[in-house]
Image (cartoon, grey):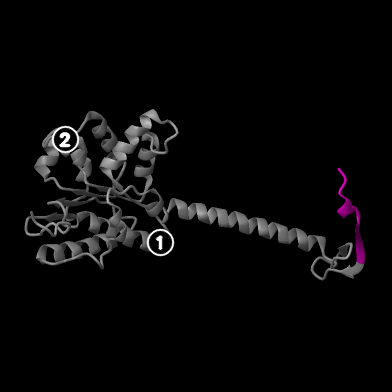
Amino acid sequence: MDFPLLNSMEQTNDICEKHQIKLSKLKNREPFCTECHREKLKLKEKNMLDTISKNQHLRRTIQTLEKDSILGDVTLWNATFDNYIADNEETAHALREAKLIAGDYVDRDRHFNTLFSGVPGVGKSHLAMAILKEVNESFDPEGSCLFISITDVLRLVKDSFNNPDSKYTENNMINLLTKVDLLVIDDFGSESSFQKKGTESSEYNQRFLFNILNARTRTIVTTNLNSDELLAIYNPKIISRLFRGVEGHVIKFTDATEDKRSNFSF
């Protein structure tokens, strides 16, 4: 193959101080050192590969929260410790405990689950998201955090049964949910309690949840159900994994805290 431009290249009498070789010249262009030019190309290629590698690393770590989370309530993206309304002793205590838990999760050697339980609308999901954001920003080196609504995940996974091209296949989701450094499972139990109260969660749901919880030791769970209701719905093996290391990391809300999402009456 003929390259006319290269055929017109000629050597000059000038010497490259670095490589001690004659400079080359192409037509009316400035003379250049072929070795310097080669080094520049290698450096450019290295910088490009470093950028790709860095972007891939960020995608697997701190960007996981934003890119892969599945929220039932998108307003949770605005949730922080600063805008959580601590308007009584119970919520003030919950906020203090959540901040301490966030600090513990930043330490990768700390392995425990956290359980937010109690009445709906008191800010369990808000505090869980606030913990995730704090940990996601504080991991050193970077780690991965993920927030998922369990009802939405199960719906997407089941929809994938008829759509093999879906990214929400069972294998993909279990792999994602088991690999992240810190996971929030929001509204645990709602996939069954939305049916008939006290109804046992389906066999498929139970198997899916067991596969996730069995592989994890750092998980935050929010639920509207108490321990008796959870035991009535789930296999004891799931409850055992759910309560793994949860001692001292249970934040429970009672009727003392009003539903923060309801500001009207009828």
Q: Position of residue 29 (x, y in %)?
A: 85, 65
Tell me, yes or no, whether the highlighted magenta stretch contains residue 10: yes
Q: Is residue 246 left or right of residue 137?
A: left
The residue depicted at 76 percent of the width and 58 percent of the height is 38
Residue at position x 70%, y 57% in the image = 42
Crowd around label 2: few <14 · some 14–19 · many ≥20 (10 Å): few
At label 1, counting other C-alpha atoms closer than 10 Å, the crowd grade (few under 14, some 14-19, many 20 or more) is few
| The magenta segment | 1-12
Front residue of this view, candidates 18 and 207: 207
Q: Secondary structure at mark 1?
A: loop
Q: Which amino acid is tagged 1?
A: Asp
- For the C terminus, the quadrant is bottom left
Residue at 72% x, 58% y is: 41
Compared to residue 211, the image places residue 72 above or below, namely below
User: Disc 2 marks which amino acid?
Assistant: Gln
Image quadrant assignment for residue 167: top left
Task: Decide if residue 85 is on the left or right side of residue 7.
Answer: left
The mark total stands at 2
Asked if residue 53 lies left or right of residue 24, the reply is left
Q: Is residue 180 visible?
A: yes
Q: Is residue 120 left or right of residue 27?
A: left
Q: Quadrant of the N terminus?
A: top right
| Whether residue 106 can be seen here | no
CA separation, marks 2 and 1? Answer: 43 Å
Name the residue carrying label 2: 195
Q: Which mark is residue 140?
A: 1
SS state under label 2 = loop
For residue 193, above or below residue 29: above
**Residue 221 drawn at (x, y percent):** 23, 49
